[in-house]
Structure formats: C-alpha cells, structure tokens
Image (cartoon, rainbow, N blue to C red):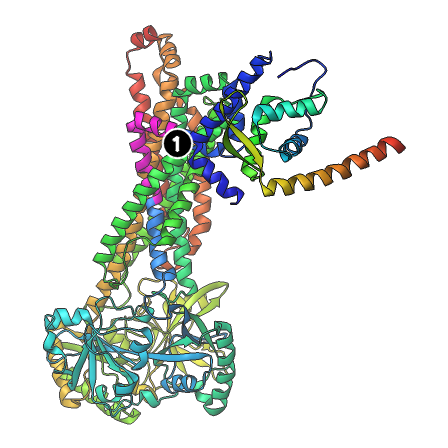
Amino acid sequence: MPMNDMSESVSPAGVLPMLILRVLHSGSLHGYAIAQRIHVLSSEVLAVEEGLLYPTLQKMLRKGWVSAEWGISETNRKVRFYHLTPTGRAQLASELSGYGRVTQAIQEILRTA
Amino acid sequence: MSEFLRRIYYLLHRRRLDAELEADMEFHREMAARSGDASFGNTLRLREQAHEAWGWTWLEHLLQDLRFGARLLFRSPGFTLMAVLVLAIGIGVNVSAFSFFDMVALKPLPVSDADRIVRLERSSATNHASEMAYPSFLFYRDHARTLSAAMATLGVPPMQIDDDLQPTSASFFTPNFFTELGAHAAVGRLFSPARDTGPAAPPSVVLSYGLWQRRFAGDPDLVGRVIHIDGKPATVVGVTPFDFASLGGQGPDLWMPIDQQPYFVARSTILQDWTTSSVRMWGKLAPGVSPAQAEQEFRALTDTLRRQHPEAVWPGEYIQSSPGGHLQVMQPQVYRVAVMVGILALLILIVACANLGGLMLARAVSRQPEITLRIAIGAGRGRIFRQLCTESLLLAALGASVGLALACAANRVILARTNAPHWLSATPDWRILLFAIFMTFAATLFFGLIPALQIARQRQHKTVARQILVGAQIAASSILLIVAALLLHAALHALYTDPGFGYQQLISVDSRLGQHGYTAAASRAYLDQMQARLRALPGVTSVSLVKLPPLGHTVSFSNVEIHGRSITIYPNWVASDFFLTMGIPIRLGRTFLPAEQHVVIVSESFARQQWPGQNPIGQLLGNGPTKDMVIGVAGDAHINALSNDDAIEQYWAAQPSDMPDMVVLVRAAGEPGSLAPSIKSISQSLDAAVLPEIRQLKLLYHDNVNQVELTAAAVSLVGLVAVSLAAIGILGLVAFAVTQRTKEIAIRIALGARPLAVLSAVLRQFRWPVIFGLIAGTILAAFGSRLLRAALYGVDNLDPLSYATAIATLVVIVCVAMLIPAARTLRLDLARILHYE
C-alpha cells in the first residue's frame, strides 16, 4: 500500500466499519481493494492498516453486515470478495445518519464556540 | 442467522476460515509488495487479532489450560491420586448427606399428583397433634372444597396372623388411599372406594409385598384365601406392588379398610369418638388451589366444627398443612437435624480442602522455575492465575466424580441394609448432580484460590498462606472431634446409666380396652381380674397399672421453664403399687391411695429444681384453681425419655375414668419371656375378643440403646476420617517446610546447634496456627453444639470431659504428625546434604 508521511491512519476505530460499508455499497471488493479504495477516495489522506482492516472485517462478518465469497482477482488469483448483506445495508444507513448528526453538531460547536 | 449462530459456525469451521483469512492476507501482501510497499505486519499476529474478533479466545485458553493441567496431573500421578482421594472423601461425604436429604425431603414420591398432596394436622398456640378424631376427618372431608380428595390412615399396634408367635404390623386406611396414589396391585386388587366402603363390605385385607414373600413364599394363589387377623377371618384381596410408595413413610404389612376397623378390633368405638385423636389426615389439593387457600378454608371449617362439637376442638385450634408428597413430612426438628448433618459434612470438606491447599502450595515451590519462566516470556499474572485455577477445577472435577461414585456406592449399601422403601434408589438425580457440580466449584474456591493467588504473585515461600491452611484444618477438625466426643459420651451415658427403673424383669400388657368398647366400670372389672390372676402366677412378684407404659407407643410431655432452665415434664397416671412394681424408690413421703385426688408425686430432680433446699412434701403444684399437693418424691425414672437427664416426671393417681386406657405392668422374678404364654391364656379366658400386646421392656430398651450406639459410631467414624485427613495434611506440610530448609538445618547442626533447638525453630511457624485453630474450633463447637442438645441425652453440650478428650486427641495427633517428618530430617546425613547443596 503506498504509504507516505502525509497519510493519516483511520481513527477513531469506530469510523472504519462505516467506511468499509460505504465502499462495499457500490460493489463487492477483496480486502486489499477495500484498503485501496478508502485510500484513493480520501485523496490519499487516509490509510487503512492491515492490523485494523482484517479484525474489523472479521467483526463485521460476525455481526452479519458483510459476507465473503470466493472470486478471482484482477491478478487472476483466487481471493475472497466481501459484499454487503441486507443487514449491512441497514447498518450503513443508520451509521450514516448518526454520523451526519454528530459531525453537524461538532461543526456547530466549532463555528459558534 | 443470528450472531450467536454465526459465532458457533465460526467455531466449528475455524480451521478452514482461518486458512481463508491467511490466503486473504497473503494476497494483500503480494499486492502491496507489487505497488512498492513491503511494510505488511506480522501475519501471525494479525491473524490472531482477526481471530480474537470472534470472541472465542476464552474458550481456547480454557482448552489450552485444561490440556496443560491434565498433562501436569498425569505427570505426577502420586500427587494426583492423593489429591483426588482427599477431595473424593470431602465431596463424597457432602454428596452422600445431600442425597439423603434429597430422598427424604426433595424427591417427589412416585405417586400421582405428588405435588398436590398435603398432610393436615391439628395445631394451636399450645398444642400440636399429628392425629385427629375420625369424625372430625369425615367432617373436613365432606365439607372441604379446596381438596379434591381426603385420605385417612389409622395406625394400630401389631396384630396376629393365624397362630403366629410374632405379631405383624397393621394399619387401617380409607379405601381411596390406593386409588388416589395411583397404585396397582402386584397380584389381586387393592382397595377401591366402590368395593370397600362401609362396614357391610366383606372383611378384606391387602398384604405388603414383603409379607407376601416372607410369610406366604410369594404364593400366587393366596388371593381369595381367608386368613385370621387377631382371630377374625378376612379374605386376602391383593398384594401391594414391590416398590409401593406410601405417604409419610407408612408401610405396614397388613392393610385393612378403615370402615372394617370395628370388625377387626371387636366393639371398638373409635370411629365414632370425637375426642380421641386417632387418624392421620392427608389431602389432595384441588387443581390450582394453594396450600394457603386450603388452610384458609379449613379455619372456617374448624370454627363451624367448634360450634357443633365443642369437645372436639381445642381453643384456638387450626389445621396446619405441610407438603406431603415426599418421603417424610418435614417438621422443624427434622430440618434442624439436616442443618446439623450439613454443617458436619461441610467441616469435612473444609478439612479436605485445607489439606489439599497445603499440598498445592508445597507443589508450587517446585513449580517455581516454570512459573518464573512463563512470566519472563510475557504471561500476565491474570493469565497464570487463571491457568492455576483451571488446574484446580480439573482436580476438583476429578475428585467430585470419584466422590459422587463413592457416595452412590455408600448410599446403595445403606439403602440395602436398612428397610428403606424399594422405590428409593441411590442413582443420583439432577438435584444431586447439580449439587456435585456446585461442590466442585466450592471446593476449587476453598483449596485452589489461596495457592493460586500466592503463586501468581510469586510469593510461594511466604508462610502466611500455609499458616492459614493449618489453622483452618485444626479448627474444623477440632469441631468435628468435639462433636464426636460429645455424642460418644452421650451414647456411653445412655448405655451405662441406670434408667431409674428395673426394666430387665418387666412386661407390659396392653389390652387397649378403650378401643374394644369397654366402659370404665367394665375395664375396671377386667383389669382387677387380670391383676388378681397374674399375682397368683408363680414367678410374678408384683403387678400394677400405668396409663403411659415405659417405652410405649404414646409419649406425652410438656415443656416448662423452672428458674430460667427449660425442662421437659413427662406426666403419668398410675396405680398405688406402680413404684414398687417398676422398682422406682420413694425417696420421701408416700405413694397414692387408690384413686386419690388432688395429690401428685414428683421426681427427685423436679423437687430439687422447683423447691431447692425446701421440703417438697405439702407443696402445691398446678396453674389452675385447684392445686395438687405433693405427697411423695420418687426417684428419677426416665420412663419415656431414656437417659434424658433433662426429663422430669410427675405422677397422678389413676382415676376410675382412666381405666379403659390402663396398661398392666408385671414384674417377673426370673426370665420375663417365660410368662408370655400364661398371660396370653389369662387374657383369652377373660375376653377372647381382646388380644393384648405383650412387650418385654428389656428388648425395647436394647433397641433404643442400639440406635444411640449406631449414631455415635457413625459420627465417630466421620470424626476419625476428618482427623486422619488433618494428620496427613499436617504431616505433608511439615515435611515440606523441613525439606525447604534442609540446608539451613544442616548448617546449623554442623555449626553445633542442638537438634532440639533447630527442630523448634523449624516448627515455630506452626505454633500459632495450631493454637488459634484449637481456640477457634473450641469456641465454634461450644456455640454450635447447642443445636445438638436434644441428641445428647442430658450430657451437657459444654461437657468438659468431652472437650478435653477431643482436644487432647487432636494435639497428640498433630504433634506426632509434626515430629515424624522433622525427626527424619535430623537423622539425615549432614555431610551429604551440604556437599549436594
């Protein structure tokens, strides 16, 4: 993963599942692609560490938000693709609205305080 | 699919899923490397982290710990065997005790609707009776809406089958007894309300399975045959099943319908008598009715009954219900016994656990390198502690399994040896298994916690824990030994104390004239003739009458307080020459004149306690308006409370109205048994319908003493087990303490210290724990033994002799247990030890 000193690792940890859910919303991806997509979409600001990515994916599998299926990678390798389940979709919606409310509140404070 | 199911799925497929995750990461690393980044972290570590996300780590640690613990135990078979044995004894005793409690009080009887069966008894603030009058029973049965059925049982003295010498136990039952319990006959039929109600039904009898086998050799053609019971012909209609479960543990050999009682006991009027409490009442609650609702209804019914038959109801009487669907109807005093047994059993567990805790500590020292290494390579204290606890739990589980097996085997033997009902089995039910599991955890806590804490904190060499364990063992053992000594003393006291009357030569002849419809005058004539003819027999030295015969079926007593001390008064009604016949000396004053009124004779100890230092003769006694004057003081004779030094007696002269209840007492010059045939023929010639019960007091006395001996033997055995456990434990601890300091001892001796001084230096650490343990144990025993009061037959629960014996025994055992290993060290080859070190 291209890491430069300008990349921030994703934190706090609670945000990562939401980002993963969001990038999977547009289609199934394998682990490396998830990390890549987040990195690229954040204009290379955010980097997802493997140490956080895989335990988080496991947790999401446990909660039933995503499920994994075998597929073939662009490099012609057999690899697991993660995709959203209906529960995951619902979870994304609720996290997004929750996140929206919280950031709005924070913005409010930052602007007026 | 819920989250839990997904977790289970993961657990079951974790190898494959783990491999898949590894493949994911491998791919990730390849791709990253391709784009010029080789900083992928430690795959193994990442995999572990991802793995933990599933939340099964605890289980894996547990399995790891269990495997490790099992390997350790397997590698030191000597320790394992010892520990499992000690635990098996400790837990086994508890499981066994609980099994009996379970059988008696918890296990439902295998009868229909056991949970709805209640026992109904008369009660008031001052009185309690297990029995009620039969007409009262009928009244309640006919009016109670909260009961779906009511059953009554009438116990009677043993009856004679045909020409048997030995009488057979017998009872009368309402015919619905068997149908309500859902019992089916082994052969023939049991009673049914349709066929066996009313005095007009043909006389019939049901035999117990045991009697059928014993006396009739299991003859299948017995049904339909006529046998004679107390001389009355009756048809055998059936046999109860082998494993018949009866209520209240009642299991006579002869069962007869209650309506036929006047037929079997000629001219009996007991079924019409409102004032004689004769039958036990059982009820089956209507579905959905609570016992409280039933009691409520019964209060109203009792009030109605009081208006109709004031003579049948006590002031303030109410009917008390208790659960009846168990082997025993639990009364408060039974609970007290259960609590006592439970405490004693727990003490054994404490001794066993303290013992094992000591062993674990000793082992911890030899395991120190291993633990240090594991902490050094990064194991947390908590993880080490958890692993040690798992090991203890494994050990406890092994011990509990063996203990459970031992308890089952022991209970099976006990059940087979006693005449327990056949439906009882020693196979553990879920309550016992649950209890064993609970005991496993309790034991783990007792023996594993202190050592595990110490080891995890790397404090193996501290002596405090060892001292606590020694103290606990000594305290628990001293309580057990003191209790055993008290009970043993009580047994010896019962065995070798003169009961106060010459029981060896006495025979009681109970004709139960009242039950045969005799009036007072007729009874008097019968008894006068009987006495006259008995006096004329050669070999009879004296004859008299008593209402409550020694060691009889009926015991009457009341508790009073004299000068702050609670004592039990046993009243009795006797004829003039009672004291002469019984061999009870008259210490002061005189005996009664026939039917003398308003006078009383009291026992020596009562006179001493009530009027210390005064002349009891002429004193007045009684709470009512008419007081009784003391005319004599008799020697203490615990007629119906053998060897109970707290019991006192008061005697009144038998009045003419007492005659139907009087029992004849005969004193023989020689062997009393030889008089029985003559007594039988006299009674036959007086009234052939009346078969008196003839009992030799000598035999009854021995039965009674045997029971006391048995209890004392059982408790002594338990005490002995505890003391042996404690001795082994202390032996091991001292041996360990000495081994730990072998080098120091060798150097000291080499430098010229006297062996005795060295020895005392090593043993000093045990001095205070032993002393504290003894003091704590003695104080606890002094308080706790008050529970035992009733079982001690008048031996004081603070009896100094018992305490001294117990403590001395324990001290001797502890000293020996300490000196053996210590002395062995002193004999070691000093040069070799120093060389080796």
Q: Callout 1 environment at 10 Å: few (<14), some (14 to 19), or many (20+)?
A: some
Place residue B163 in its image quadrant.
bottom left
What is the quadrant of the C terminus of chain B in the image? top left
User: Which residue, as the protein is rendered here, is positioned at the far top?
Assistant: B835
**Residue B58 visible in the current orientation:** yes
What secondary structure is marked by label 1? helix
Residue at screen point 51% across, 43% down:
B4
Amino acid type, callout 1? Leu
Instruction: Find disc 1 in the rendering and name its residue.
Output: B66
For the residue pair B635 and B170, the one nearer the viewer reads as B170
User: Which residue, as the protein is rendered here, is positioned at the far right?
Assistant: A112
For the residue pair B183 and B604, the one nearer the viewer reads as B183
Up-down: is B111 above or below B626?
above
Bounds of the magenta segment:
B67-91
Identify the subunit bearing mark 1. Answer: B
Residue at screen point 42% across, 19% down:
B370
Up-down: is B672 above or below B824?
below
**Residue B452 visible in the current orientation:** no
Residue at screen point 30% across, 41% down:
B402
**What is the chief secondary structure element of the magenta stretch?**
helix
Whether B205 is among the magenta residues is: no
Up-down: is B688 above or below B735?
below
The image shows residue B535 at horizontal and vertical percentages of: 16, 82
The image shows residue B499 at horizontal and vertical percentages of: 28, 64
